[in-house]
Image (cartoon, helix red, strand yellow):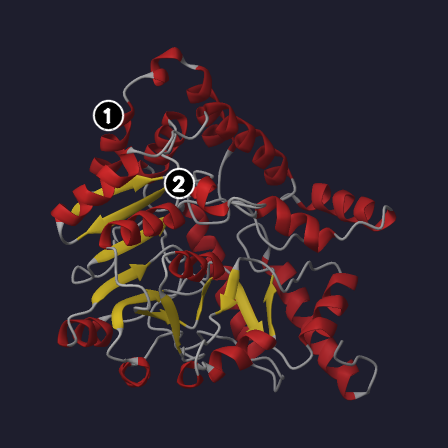
Amino acid sequence: MIPRKRIDIGWADLASGLLACVVPGALVGGARAAAKVESAWRTARGNLACLSVRSGFDALLSVLQLPAGSEVLVSAVTIRDMTRIIEAHGLIAVPVDVDHQTLAVSRAALERALSPRTRMVLVAHLFGSRMPMRDVVEFSNKNNILLIEDGAQAYTGDGWRGDISSDVCLFSFGPIKTATALGGAVMTFRDTVLRDRVRDAMSAWPLQARVSYCARLLKYALLVLLGYRPCYTVFASAMALLRVDCERLLAASLRGFAGGEFLAKIRRRPSMPLLALLHRRIRQGVQPAVGRRAERARQLAALLGAEPLSVVRPGATAAWHSHWVFPIVHPRADALIAYLQSHGFDATRGASSMAVVAATHGEGRASKAEQLFARLCYLPAHEGMRARDIERLAAAVRAFEADALAGNWRAA
């Protein structure tokens, strides 16, 4: 079985993180460790290291203290926890539809969602693409609205740090992100005074437990092993024999803040071992795996695009794409996943924590995003695959289409 995705961290990185958990010298100097991360980020704006993007966004909203009932325009497809945080602060998330071909939000969609209560725009670069920001910047400037840019899925280790005109840019190094440190995030601020206020708010939070981060490193070492085909094949077979839902188990394992007390869990300062590994990953720069991953994705896109298939690939005409994941939209998504898994490809509906932002009032429905997400699935197209694996995957999709036309496979 070819696994759905590889965790982008090496054994030397894991060893470095574990060493930082036990080295006495790492027990002191938290501010100094954070400063090293922020310096390594290399922007002319104000940088701030934090436990996660969720943590940083929560602290930002705490500092801003927007009036209850204020509206935040949000890319209609985003991480579900971001809307959860918005609502926890008494605010309303208003979805802004996303063009499935470009994965961008349009100026027209933003204008339709605007109301007198709008105070903030939160746009996310999706699935490894980067949308042009000019229209979003002009819209936010015209309406005097704070612009937050979420670049978590688009980071590749290059010099890109978001649009210089965005008020705040968010970058994640969570478990399934490129160049992961198995946690950690960096925020960049146009206004350094706002950065300092957010830092002060975080300073009152408890420190992430060192033993907790050490346990996370050990857990993900096991999950890294599952990125190797033989290990994953044994794992998937064992789960099938034990009648364990492999999809649910993996989703739970990869979830950063599972269980209850969500806000308490994100309101932590990063431990020094996490900051040390985050600093290491940032300094490594461009990740070699990114190029191989993009090459495999382009190969698969070309093979699927050469056939008259029912497959639609979100982001096919995106201005820039690193192919963090390979999503497709298919009218028989569940049946296609079952078919591919029976042929040794671990396709999935849940490769990330993405969700469609629910509308709370009539004008806020994001119909395009809802239609896209209802039929979305993710194909394995990563750096661990060979060219012939991609060819076999494309052939399996074509075979499914032929079987579906013959009535052998129906939508689940």
Which amino acid, by three-letter code, is at mark 1?
A: Arg
Q: Position of residue 125 (x, y in %)?
A: 37, 64
The residue to which callout 1 is attached is 32
Q: Which mark is residue 313?
A: none
Residue sitting nearer the eye, 222 or 264: 264
Outermost residue toward the right? 241
Q: Quadrant of residue 316?
A: bottom left
Residue most extreme to the top: 24
In this rendering, the label closer to the viewer, 1 or 2? 2
Whether residue 288 sits left or right of residue 48 in the image: it is right
Judging depth in this view, the residue of 194 and 239 nearest the camera is 194
The residues bearing labels 1 and 2 have C-alpha atoms spaced at a distance of: 20 Å
Mark 1 crowdedness (10 Å alpha carbons): few <14, some 14-19, many ≥20: few
Is there any visible trace of residue 96 in the rendered image? yes
**Secondary structure at numbered mark 1:** helix
- Marks 1 and 2: CB-CB under 8 Å? no
- In the figure, residue 204 lies in which quadrant? top left
Q: Secondary structure at mark 2?
A: loop
Residue at screen point 49% across, 73% down: 358
What's under tag 2, amino acid-wise? Arg
Q: Classify mark 2: residues with Cα within 10 Å, few (<14), some (14-19) or many (20+).
A: many
Q: Nearer the N terminus, badge 1 or badge 2?
A: 1
Q: Which mark is residue 267?
A: 2
The relative height of residue 104 versus residue 1 in the rendered view (above or below) is below
Q: Residue at x 33, y 67 (%)?
A: 123
294 shown above or below 306: above
- Image quadrant in which the C terminus is located: bottom right
